[in-house]
Amino acid sequence: MENIKQNKMATEPVKKLFWKMGLPMIISMVLQALYNVVDSIFVANMEGTGALANEALTIAFPIQIMIIAIGVGTGVGLNALLSMSLGEKNGEKVNTVAGNGIFLCLVIYAVFLLFGLFLAKWFIGLFTDNAAVLTMGTNYLRICTCFSLGAIGFNIYERFLQATGKTVCSTIAQISGAVANIVLDYVFIFPLDMGVEGAAWATIIGQFISMFVAMAFHYFSNKEIGGSPKYIKPNGAIIKAVYRIGASAALMQAFLSVMMAGVNAILGSANVDSTILVGSFGIYYKIQQIALFSAFGLSNTMITVLSFNYGMKNKERAEACVKCGIIDTLITTLALTVLFEIIAKPLSMLFSLSGGASAALVDVCAMATRIASLGYIFMGFTVAVQGVLQALGYAGKPLLLSFFRLILFVFPIAYLFTLSTNVLNLVWWTFPIAEALTCIFAYIFLKNVMKNKIDTISTGK
């Protein structure tokens, strides 16, 4: 029965398969983004300290992104390697890849545990000298890193499910944790008055719930991947292969962390109230992740389906995967642009329901959302092209595109805008400009990879 399901990646119409697998992935990725959005909504509405608490979470956010980055990057490598191995019908390799994924999960967690214990306060102190922000940021970050196993583990088990086409199972796991997070955010922050620590614990518990549900689906229904503990033994060749593909994905996500930290520093140096400017950026960027992670969900679908069909040397279906993936990503990101243009103000007002955040912060956040969302369609194209490149085994080119859109263009443009006396209105144009410039390079890379990889399948080159 499972073999029939797996074979659908080779026989089912690509358009139907893409959305059958892609929609659950989009939901899963968006829910992952909502963890941080929900935390910020509840924290920003804390009476009296909402604005400062929101600034603290904004400063801590780059490390949360880094946790996701390394987990996602490792997962992308595992996903592509598992999909190729399943397409090749190499059961022993499939099991070895999965076992090494669990091993890597434990190693990554150990690194963030040490960071949380010894470096959390140092990191927050790099961006603020406000004692209240320093304390709240340190407490929040320490909890999120020291108990990050749930987030990292879910990323790994989610990829096990996605590689075998069980995206609905991974979505159910993600929804379970997201619902728990929302409920616990309210309970911990308001009735129990736990402050930012409550938001952190709500996030951690939600992540562990998602991981445990994903593990249950994997071990009880994912029969194509063996669960024997003997495969957890590290295999240098497998780990190297995972990161040959996944390292660029991890670095691409890590650039989000670098960008957030860098822009926090740039905005903090502007001659404007940092609570407004940095806080608005933090809220906006968490909202923006809904669009970004939607594109990533489709990109991850493309990685799975394209890797499988490329492994089977099916040129027609590989071409269809690329075409369908790019077009559907453009449609999705365009729809999100229209949506955010319409709901920018009411969405921003969610962060000041109880007056915790100022009206000025809400107004600036709404403006940021309207301006920056104009770049979503360019971002969608770039992310889709990155998915094509990753599926076909490229590492440097997708990484270069992330470097362009998140660092090379963003930092100098943002800095120039902060020199203006109208920084609150102008700085948000940084993001659509950077996305549009990167899109040019993405198009060039796509043309090259179609010529050198897809077009040569039938010739055996």
Image: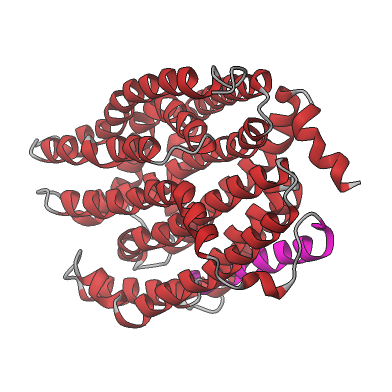
Q: Is residue 118 magenta?
A: no
Q: Check the image and report above or below for 443 versus 376.
A: above
Lateral position of residue 333 relative to residue 127, left or right = right
Q: Residue at x 55, y 22 (%)?
A: 454
Q: Which residues are magenta?
A: 199-223
Give the image quarter of residue 139: bottom left
Q: Is residue 195 visible?
A: no
Q: Is residue 218 magenta?
A: yes
Number of marks in the rendered image: 0
Lateral position of residue 103 relative to residue 131, left or right = right
Q: Position of residue 225 (x, y in %)?
A: 75, 58
Q: Nearer the viewer, residue 219 or 421?
A: 219
Lateral position of residue 367 relative to residue 197, left or right = left
Q: Check the image and report above or below for 139 versus 390.
A: below
Give the image quarter of residue 17: top right
Q: Nearer the viewer, residue 427 or 221?
A: 221
Q: Residue at x 32, y 53 (%)?
A: 358
Q: Position of residue 224 (x, y in %)?
A: 79, 54
Furthest toward the right, the residue is 1
Q: Residue at x 45, y 49 (%)?
A: 244
Q: Check the image and report above or below for 421 versus 60.
A: above
Q: Is residue 8 visible?
A: yes
Furthest toward the bottom, the residue is 117
Q: Position of residue 97 (x, y in %)?
A: 62, 59
Is most of the magenta stretch helix, strand or loop?
helix
Q: Check the image and report above or below for 108 versus 388.
A: below
Q: Residue at x 38, y 25 (%)?
A: 442
Q: Position of residue 289 (x, y in %)?
A: 46, 44
Question: What sort of colour scheme is used for the picture?
Answer: secondary structure
